[in-house]
Amino acid sequence: MARINPSDVERQLREASAEAPPPDLLKRIVAEIPAAVPVFSVPSPVPVRRGWSVGARRLLAASILVTLTAAGLTWESRIRLAKPEAAALASSAPATPAVPRPDGVPGAAEPPAQEPSAAPQSLALAAPKPVPRRDRASAELSPLKAAPTMTAPTGGVVGGFAPLPPVTAAEDAPVATESLQAMKKAAPPAAVPGGPSRPDASASPSLDDGADERAIRAPMNAVAAPIRSQQQTDRINVGGNERFAGAAPLAGSGVEMLEGGVPQTLRMKVEDPFGRPLTGVSLLVSPRGDSAGGHEVATDASGWASAAPVTPGDYALRAALPGYLPSESTVAVGEDGAAVRVRLFPQPSGALGSAVRRPLSPAPSDRLAMLERRLAEQGVAALSELTVANLERGLDDADAAPLDQPVRLRIEGSRGSQAQTRWVRVDLRADSLLPGSAVEIRFPTASVEWVRRLGQPAREAVSMNPIVLRLRETGDSVAESWLFEVGLRNASSAEPVATVLLRTQSGQAGSAQTLSAASSDHLLSGASVGLRLAVVAADLASAAHRPEAERMQALQSVAAEAQALARRETDRRAEELVRIAFRALTLASRPASRR
Amino acid sequence: MTEVESSPSQGLLGLAPRSRAADDSGLLRAYAAGDRDAAEQLVAQSYGAVFALLRRLCGDSDLAADLTQESYRKAWAALRQFDGRSSFATWVCRIGYNVFLNQLRRPRRLVPLEERVEATASDPSPSVEELVGATIASDKLRRAVMSLDEGLRFPVAAFYWGDVPVAEIARQLEITTVAVRKRMRKALQLLALALEEGS
C-alpha cells in the first residue's frame, strides 16, 4: 500500500483539474439578474474572530467553575432555608402561639405537628388562583363579568395557560376532599361500601410520608395528563411542512354536595364551568369496588339526572360528555339519599394549522414531458420543444380543443433552472367548545407581501392585521377552518408566515404559535407537478362527456382566464401556467377527425 | 501568515480579499442604487470561483454550470440577507455548496456517492473513467472529500477548490481562523488515510 502524506493530499487538492467555465455561463447568469433592485442595506465587513489565547481560556474556565460552584451552594442553602418558611406559610391552621425553645431563644416557634402534611395539601389546592367570593358570584352571573380574572394581557401574545374558572379555596375544598377521599379509598386493598361518610376535611389522609403526597398530586396529574398528551400529539412535522397546535386548555372537574336529597336516590346536576346545565351527559353510578353493577343515566335539558334506587354507601360517579374532560369521583350516599353538582370542563381547545410551501412553480425555461406516449402515437410532433415560456407566448385561444382522455404531464426543470416558490398555503383549523371563541391570525409584514383567503377573490392587505376569525357554532361544537394563500416577500423558508392565537369569548388566550414555511427543498418537484396535472387532466376528462361545442367554449374560457391571470398576477402564474400547458397539449393532440 | 497569504491563489478572482470585500461593498451600493452593471461586475468577479468549486465537487462541467446558475439565482433572491460577513464571492460559494448538497439529496438528479461507489465496485468491466488514470485519481480524491464530515468538508473544498481565503471561511462558519486551520489539517490527515486505503 502506497504511503500518502497529508502534504501529498494537499498537493493533489491544489492540482485537481480545474476547467474554465463554459463561455455562455456568464451570459446565462447575468441574464437572470433581477431588474428590480431588492432593498437591502449595504453591509460593512465584519472583523475576523481571533482565537482566544491559552491563558484567557483557562481564566474563563476557572471563572465559570467558580461561578457555578457558588451558584450551586447558594441554591442549596436557599432551599434549606425556605423549606420551613414555606411550610409555615402554607399551613391553613391558625397561628400557633410562640413556644419558648429549650434554649430560651425568644420568639422562636416550634413548627406545628401537622405542618409537614399541610404543605402538600395546599399545593394540591393551589392550581386555580383563589379570588374573592364576590368575583366568583359575578362570574356565575355573567361570563363576561369574570373578565378581570380571566382576561389575557393586552398585546396579543400570551404564554401559558390561564385557569378557568376562578374558584375560591373554600369552595374548592370539598372537591379536593373528594379527590383525597377517592385516593384514600383506592389505596387500601378492598374498599367495602360501608355506612354513610360525608365528606369532611378531617378525613384527609395522614400526610406524614411521601406516598400520601404522591396520592394528593395524582388527581392533578390525571387532569394535566390529557392536556400534555394533546399538546404533544398536535405537534407534527411531516415533510418540511410545519404543523402546530395553539392550545388554550381549560381543564379540571369536580363534585360538590348539594342540599335536598331524596331517600334511596342520587340526584346529580351537571354544569359547565360557567354554571350552565349540560344536557346529555352520560353518568355512571356504581358501588365502590363493584364496577359491574350500577346505574347509567343521562342528564336532561336542565342538566339534572337521578339514579335510583341506591342504598347508602360510597359510589363511584363517572361523568362523560364528548368534548369535555371525563370526571370520576366518589360520592357518599346516606339514608336520605344525596344530591351532587358535577362540573365538567372542556377539553383543551386549540387551533391547528399548517403552512405548505407549494411545490408548483415552473420557470419559463422548464420543459414539458409526457408521462404517456399516446400523444406521440397520434402524430403530434415537436413535443420536445414545448417549454412553459413557449406555451405562454404561443397559445391561441381560438385553436382550443378538448382531449378525449387526460394526458399526464411532467414539468422538468431545465437543469439548474428550478424556480423557487414564493407563496405558501396556510391551512388553519380551530375548534373550541366555548361559544364566541375566535382565532386571531397575524401575518408579519416583514416577510409576507399579500394574503388571500380562499373563496374571496380579492387579496387582503397585510395591513389588516390582525384578522379575527370567529368560530362558527354548529350543533354542540364550535369549529371552523380557513385556507389562506400567502405571498412571501422572498423565498426564504425560515421567515414566519403567520402567528395564530386562539381567544375565548372572555378574552382568554392560548399561547401564540408561529407558522413558518420551513422546507428543506424549495425546488420544483416533478412528481408533485405531475400529480397536480393529473388532477387538472381529470377535470378536462370530465368535460369530454359534454357536447363538443360546449367543451370548446369552456376550454376557451379557461384558457383565456389562465392567460389573463398569467399576465397579471405573477404569484398565481405557476398554477395557471400548468393549465395553459395542459390546454396547449389538448390543442396539439386533437384528433384529426376533429380538426 | 497573513490572511492574504492564506489564499491558495489570487489569480482566480483577480483581487486580494481585503480589497475585494471593499470593492464588493461599493458594487452592492451601486446595485442598490439601480446600477445593473455593478451586479454584472459582481458576477464576473465571482462566478469563476463558484464554478470551480462546484466543478470539483460534482465532477461534471455541465452540472456545475447549472448549479452555478442556480446559486446566483438563490443569491439574488436572498441578497437582503447578505450581511457582509464575508465577500460576495465567498457568500455565493457557500450558497453554491448548499445547492450542491441539495442536488445530492434529490432523487434521480444525481447518483448518490455511495451508490456510485457500489456500482463501480460491483461492475467487473472497466468503465471509461477507469481507463483514464487522471480521472480516477481525481474522482477518488473527490469521493474522499465528500466522505468527510460536513465540518471538515466545507473548509477543504472552499479553500482548495473555491480559492476562498481562510479568514473568509472563518467568517462564514463563525469560527476562528485557528479553528479553520485545525480542521483543514485534520481533514488532510483523514484524506491521506482514505486515499491510502483506496490505493
Image (tube, coloured by chain):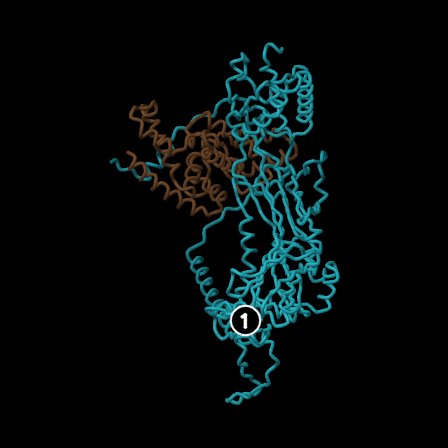
Q: Is residue A103 above or below residue A124?
A: below
Q: In this view, does B27 lie to the left or right of A61?
A: right
Q: Residue B1, position in %: x, y? A: 42, 44
- Quarter of the rendering containing residue B199: top left
For the point 26% across and 37% down, the residue is A3
Which of the pair B103/A499 is nearer the observer?
A499
Chain identifier, colour brown: B
Q: Residue A73, position in %: x, y? A: 47, 70
Q: Residue A403, position in %: x, y? A: 60, 18
Q: Chain A is drawn in which colour?
A: cyan
Name the secondary structure under disc 1: helix
Graded by Cα atoms within 10 Å as few (under 14), some (14 to 19) or many (20 or more), the crowding at tag 1 reads many
Q: Mark 1 points at which residue?
A: A120
Which of the pair B6/A476 is nearer the observer?
A476
Q: Is residue A415 above or below residue B87?
A: above
Instruction: Confirm whether residue B76 shows in the render.
Output: no
Q: Which chain carries label 1?
A: A
Q: Residue A371, position in %: x, y? A: 51, 22
